[in-house]
Image (tube, rainbow, N blue to C red):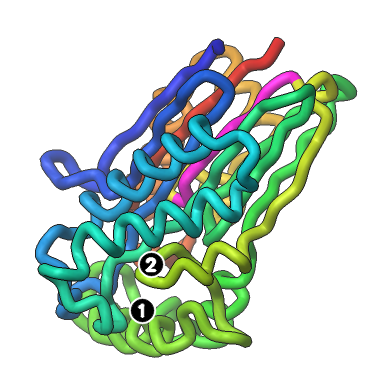
């Protein structure tokens, strides 16, 4: 496997709540999340949740090739729940959650799973790129976040509006008509986007957290072809640097309204040929 990995926390010295890892023929990326300032009911924290879930998921994917990625994710969620439900109150709406991107290469095919707003980028031999992203969180967010986007990022007014927005958003988490994300309930895995593509049709597979994809889907400063060009020529760290450079030019979110000036940013780039 020819894999390059880059990851950076939102702020220096801050805990990185993203998690990415690889094993022979498999890779996962998770972007942990919680509601800022809200009681979580969990003594472990978001980074623990995303890394524990990611490690168990990767182990399940490689140990049980006959089980689907959906089944492996449900198993991993169930296992994480068993690890901390004795010490944590998982009924809190703000309990730690995580997006999930997982891939497994086996028998000449690549199986994939995407849950939440992280992205899987597939590059094929004809030069075409396909981005697989779960848009349900964004679709729900667009209905709720107008008051947030009208205020400067980092201002007290923005913080108050963001808290109200996040509270409303958690009420729609893992609910019909809302969005789905990995949390305490294994049934969320059933709502992941899944698919299979011939392995020999691909040149690379890239897993990205939304702290990186904002360069494309929020800032409109690059397309996926350019992203792959940066990864091929300079690697994940340079792509993340470009994100940070753009964010530094708009610290108050006036040009690009966003919940956080900076976010954890992670890229896992797997070159197949």
Residue lying furthest right in this view? Answer: 126
Find residue 107 and report its horizontal and vertical position in percent: 75, 24
Left or right: 99 in relation to 124: left
Q: Do the residues labelled 1 and 2 touch (CB within 8 Å)?
A: no
Q: Mark 1 points at which residue?
A: 151
Q: Is mark 2 on a helix, strand or loop?
A: loop
Does residue 220 appear anywhere in the picture? no
Q: Quadrant of residue 157?
A: bottom left
Which residue does the image show at 25% across and 82% down from the upper left? 92
Left or right: 146 in relation to 6: right
Find residue 94 and report its horizontal and vertical position in percent: 27, 77
Main SS, magenta region, reads strand
Q: In this view, does 41 lie above or below 25?
A: below
Numbered marks: total: 2
Find residue 38 and report its horizontal and vertical position in percent: 19, 79
- Residue 209 on the magenta span: yes
Which residue does the image show at 47% across and 33% down from the upper left? 267
Crowding near pointer 2: few (<14 within 10 Å), some, many (20+)? many
Find residue 15 and report its horizontal and vertical position in percent: 17, 46
Q: Mark 2 points at which residue?
A: 183
Left or right: 215 in relation to 79: right
Which residue does the image show at 54% across and 36% down from the upper left? 64
Instruction: Give the magenta part as a residue range.
Output: 203-210
Q: In which quarter of the image is residue 257?
A: bottom left
């Amino acid at each position: 496997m020819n894999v390059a990995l880059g990851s950076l926390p939102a702020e220096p010295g801050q805990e990185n709540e993203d998690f990415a890892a690889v094993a022979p023929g498999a890779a996962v990326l998770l972007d942990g999340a919680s509601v800022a300032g809200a009681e979580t009911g969990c003594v472990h924290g978001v980074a623990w949740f995303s890394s524990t879930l990611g490690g168990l998921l990767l182990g399940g994917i490689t140990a049980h090739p006959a089980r689907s990625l959906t089944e492996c994710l449900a198993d991993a969620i169930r296992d994480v729940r068993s690890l901390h439900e004795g010490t944590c109150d998982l009924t809190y709406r703000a309990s730690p959650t995580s997006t999930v991107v997982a891939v497994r290469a086996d028998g000449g095919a690549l199986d994939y799973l995407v849950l939440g707003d992280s992205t899987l980028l597939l590059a094929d031999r004809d030069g075409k790129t396909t981005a697989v992203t779960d848009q349900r969180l964004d679709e729900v967010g667009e209905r709720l976040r107008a008051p947030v986007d009208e205020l400067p990022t980092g201002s007290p007014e923005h913080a108050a509006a963001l808290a109200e927005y996040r509270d409303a958003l958690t009420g729609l988490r893992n609910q019909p008509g809302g969005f789905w994300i990995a949390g305490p309930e294994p049934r969320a895995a059933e709502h992941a986007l899944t698919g299979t593509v011939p392995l020999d049709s691909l040149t690379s597979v890239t897993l990205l957290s939304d702290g990186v994809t904002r360069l494309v889907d929020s800032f409109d400063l690059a397309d996926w072809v350019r992203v792959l060009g940066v990864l091929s020529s300079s690697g994940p760290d340079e792509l993340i640097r470009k994100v940070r450079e753009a964010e530094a030019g708009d610290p108050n979110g006036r040009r690009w309204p966003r919940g956080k000036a900076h976010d954890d940013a992670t890229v896992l780039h797997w070159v197949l040929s």
